[in-house]
Image (cartoon, rainbow, N blue to C red):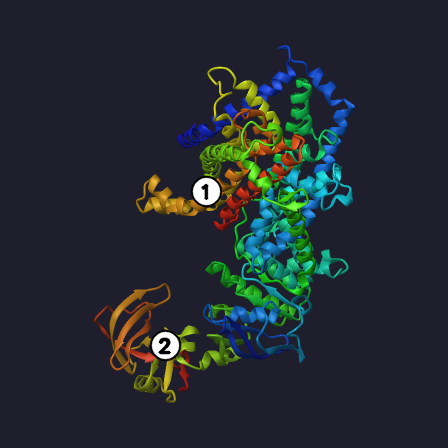
Amino acid sequence: MLTLREVTVTFDGRPAVDDVSLELPDGEVLAVLGPSGCGKSTLLRVIAGLEPLDAGSVAWDGEDVSRVPTHRRGFALMFQDGQLFDHLTVARNVGYALRLRRVPDPDRRVADLLDLVGLPTYGERLPGTLSGGERQRVALARSLAVEPRLLLLDEPLSALDAGLRERLAGDLRAILETAGTTALLVTHDHEEAFAVADRLAVMRSGRIVQQGPISDVWRRPVDAETALFLGYAVVLEGDAATRLLGAAGAPASPAVALRRSALAVADDGPLRGRVVSSRLTPDQVRLRLDVPGLGELDAVAGLDTHAGPGDEVAVRVDGSRLAPIAGD
Amino acid sequence: MNRRLLGLLALALVPVVVLGVFFVLPVSGMLALGLRPDGVLDPGAVVEVLTRSRTGRVLGFTLWSAAAATACAVVLGLPAAYVLHRTTFPLRRVLRAALLVPFVLPTVVVGVAFRQLLRDGGPLGVLGLDGTPVAIVLGLVFFNVAVVVRVVGGAWEALDGRAGQAAATLGASPAQVFRTVTVPALRPAIVSAATVVFLFCATAFGIVLTLGGTRYATVETEIYLLTVQVFDLPAAAALSILQLVVVVGLLVLAQRARAVAPVPRAPARPRRLGRSDGVPVAVTLLLLAFVAIPIGSLVAGSLRVDDGWSLANYAALGTTGDREALQVTVTQALANSLRTAVDATWMAVGTGLLVAVVVTRRSRTAAERRVRGALDGFFMLPLGVSAVTLGFGLLITLDEPPLDLRDSPLLVPVAQALVALPLVVRTLVPVLSGIDDRQRQAAASLGAGPLRSVLTVDLPVLWKPLLAGAGFAFAASLGEFGATSFLAREDFPTLPLVIFRLLGHPGELNYGMALAASVLLASTTAVVMLLVERLRVASVGAF
């Protein structure tokens, strides 16, 4: 189990990581989610031992490893761009750590790992000839080769294009599960976090503002900014929140975050609004509605509705697409 | 033949003609003179020369001394490259500039400094190294170690630190990271530096001549002796051919090894010096001492007259020496040197700029790429071809109309410019090839004409390297000895020639003046190089 206690790192007097405490039980995958520049990569480098910490401690199974040099920690770090060794073949890259440790019969293990990441015939290729996705797979296999007690992933998928990212995220999840690896990934992309992780920690300006099982964080964001970062479209407060929650039949709360699809056009809906604009997508029609007392909100409608700008429509509120936010 | 290729050839025309007339013609003229003494090609003579036992000894000594000096330069240079380019401490830039000074020191000055240090009664005379091969190797190392520090240091500085970090997180200890990640990444730079150093050592002239005399001859000094003293031109030509073959081979090797200018993706921040850097720091200090001691003893020696301190040697620089050793005063020779260097500089920079532009423009077709590759190699040739062959060749081929330049004041600058040309090209090429062609395309798409886009995109990046290259060429031409010794007119000698001349004349005052003149020449070059270093152009001294 990885335990971080009150970890602080300062650059030129400014805290990059500020009093961060985290726990990661064995076998789980934790995603640290935050905007760029929030200090999440620094946090990762601190755990790997690549960045000295100014205060606090990093411990594994209760043993403080803060002073242990990187290569003795047994934490493998997978870089954003893979950082494959360009002068070595794919097989040599994957077997790199095995050879360092003089593990007997490394070739066999390398072949198994290349199978695991779906590149069984790539052993003799050079990294320069691989696509971005292939490089990341090789980097993953290389990191898994030594069966690290903790795998650290620095935005593993962000350098890839959208379709590939989605596919690889699923693969990554499956591979980590198969290998039973404890892993910590940092990312700025909430969808990547959802696809791969069990637990989520939201980081902002060097601090962890919320952490827990991924569904808990998702359903109860701690504040408006977190909600928006988790992909909620808008946050309503005060009277507007009360009205909307009332219309949804949900208990009152000082603030509420709405998904883009929280409002749906329905003839028997309790709220009415005027269409500002509408846009056709393959699955549904997306509308902007001006709802009196609530302001301009997103809504969806079936493909058979033909509401144009200026029309008035009735909408209902989908309670499962709301997240109440407790006040500060 | 499309328009692009034509444009390329037009641009390449000037440097090709310059190099053709002032380099290929003289060198081949020299070879022809040796190979066809009576107008008939006689390859048997070449074979005869190459099978002489003296030739074997000379070649053996050349290879041995160059290999030994290269090995020492690499061993001393690598730790210094690390300390000076990968860590940070006060005075780092000054030390970097100081280590570059020996490379541009005139070879004659280096020879004088080592003799002053090692001769009987000199500060290190007890070692008994004067006139031994060890002294020659030490001189070569002193001269060339800067190349290793520069080339490898530059590559090391641009190395992405994260590859090493990735290895560390996979369990590699610092030593293992160095062996399995850092060294392979630096290998092209190390091979390239070693090749160039070997090349310089194997064709060294001034150092070997002043330190080895006639007892220890290398191919280069042997060519000089055969040409000037023995007048055995066929033998000289045969040795020149041998040298040319070896040099071209090495240049090809260097070209292969020279990695495409590394793109610094995320260059590591230099670290503070720490306790774990003990060994590299110790080697760097040793190297600094090795560089400082000969220079120190040279300066000290120039201030000694009759066992006392005095400026008399410097005061005598306004004279022609004891018993009229010289035709002009030393100060007059310095003025000659400066004037010659100015001319050589504009020639080298002008030609070098054209060459750099030609070889770095992006190729669209394989044929175009081959043409550029061939040109790139072609313009590197002066780096390794015997300056003696070049000088003597210029003398014998440019002596009749329409190219009667024998008495032209431009002949010496032309020869020096050719020697400095590769230095200028190597300084500019990495910078020019580092400019993304899309920048020019972006400028063009915003409405900038070709000239305007050069002003917007190329000039801001290029002016500093251009100045640095000019300074480098200026310094190199100030110290040029091999070719100049053939071409300079008796009444218009340059400072290195005057120093060599003073050394050859008996008399305490003449020797003292040689030391003082060496200090004068060395400090002039050092000032130029310090100015160049202030421009902070990474590619200066890179090959």
Residue matched to label 1 = B466
User: Quick one: SS at disc 2?
Assistant: loop
- Residue B31 vs A42, above or below: the answer is above
Residue B483 is tagged as: none
Residue beneath the point at 73% across and 20% down: B49
Residue A86 in sight here: yes
Q: Position of residue B272 (x, y in %)?
A: 59, 63
Chain of the residue under label 1: B
Chain of the residue under label 2: A
Residue A262 is tagged as: 2
* Number of numbered discs on residues: 2
Q: In the image, what residue type sits under mark 1? A: Leu
Quadrant of the image containing the N terminus of chain B? top left
Residue A95 in sight here: no
In the rendered image, the residue lying farthest to the left is A310
- Relative placement, left or right, of A80 versus A74 is left
Q: In the image, what residue type sits under mark 2? A: Ala
Q: Position of residue A245 (x, y in %)?
A: 35, 85
Residue beneath the point at 30% across and 81% down: A269
Q: CA distance from mark 1 to mark 2?
A: 63 Å
**In this view, the mark in front (1 or 2):** 1
In the rendered image, the residue lying farthest to the bottom is A251
- Residue B51 vs B140, above or below: the answer is above
Instruction: Please tell me in which quadrant of the rendered image residue A168 appears.
Output: bottom right
User: Quick one: SS at disc 1?
Assistant: helix
Of the pair B306 and A247, the residue shown nearer to us: B306
